[in-house]
Image (cartoon, rainbow, N blue to C red):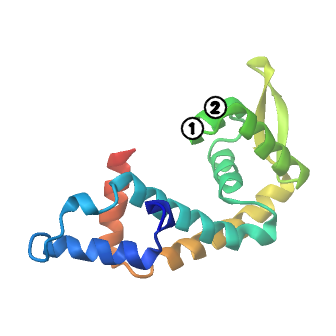
Amino acid sequence: MSSQEDMPASQIANMLARLNTVGSAGDSVEHLPFIGFLINKAAQSVVARSDALLEPFGINSRHYGILYVIAQEPGLPQKAIGEKLRIDRTTMVKLVDDLEKLGLVQRQKDPNDRRAYALSLSALGAEKLPDISQHVQQAEALILASLTPEEIQQLLAILIKLL
């Protein structure tokens, strides 16, 4: 294989399983992929599965993140949503354009800044969001199916600490 990026998931899982036997089989931690690599691969898997279930709505995980924030904080400026989600300005404009074309969000002039836009769900967006959210929950259930409830809680706690 040319790089760790090309490594199949089964090979990564086998390497992780060897963590318990480091030293006994001559393996060392240095032969394992770095933590950032593993987190990135896990994130790619989560996004791919979520995106597949969101495809019928014409959106992806990033679009859903925006819809979720708008539902939680209607009228929030587009720039603030981008900052919350760590989406650069150019990408944010494109994603909101997509959502607007689908009729899911509306842009209004921000009353506090004439140069900015405040975002809200359209009537269609508010109607469709519960169904979209259900698909996201289905993706998460599939992704987490191999974990126990305790492991899920541990994973959430660790991820929150890393943020």
Q: Residues within 10 Å of mark 2 (few under 14, many from 20)?
A: few
Disc 1 and disc 2: Cα gap in Å?
6 Å
Q: Amino acid at mark 2?
A: Ala
Q: Position of residue 119 (x, y in %)?
A: 76, 38
Position of 161 relative to 157 (above/below) = above
Secondary structure, mark 2, is helix
Q: Which residue is mark 1?
A: 84
Asked whether the beta carbons under mark 1 and mark 2 sit within 8 Å of each other, the answer is yes
Quarter where residue 84 is shown = top right
Say left or right for 13 vs 123.
Answer: left
Q: Is residue 77 visible?
A: no
* Of the pair 47 and 5, the residue shown nearer to us: 5
Instruction: Assign the C terminus to one quadrant of the image.
Output: top left
Q: Position of residue 73 (x, y in %)?
A: 64, 41
Q: Amino acid at mark 1?
A: Lys
Say left or right for 64 vs 96.
Answer: left
Q: Which residue is mark 2?
A: 80
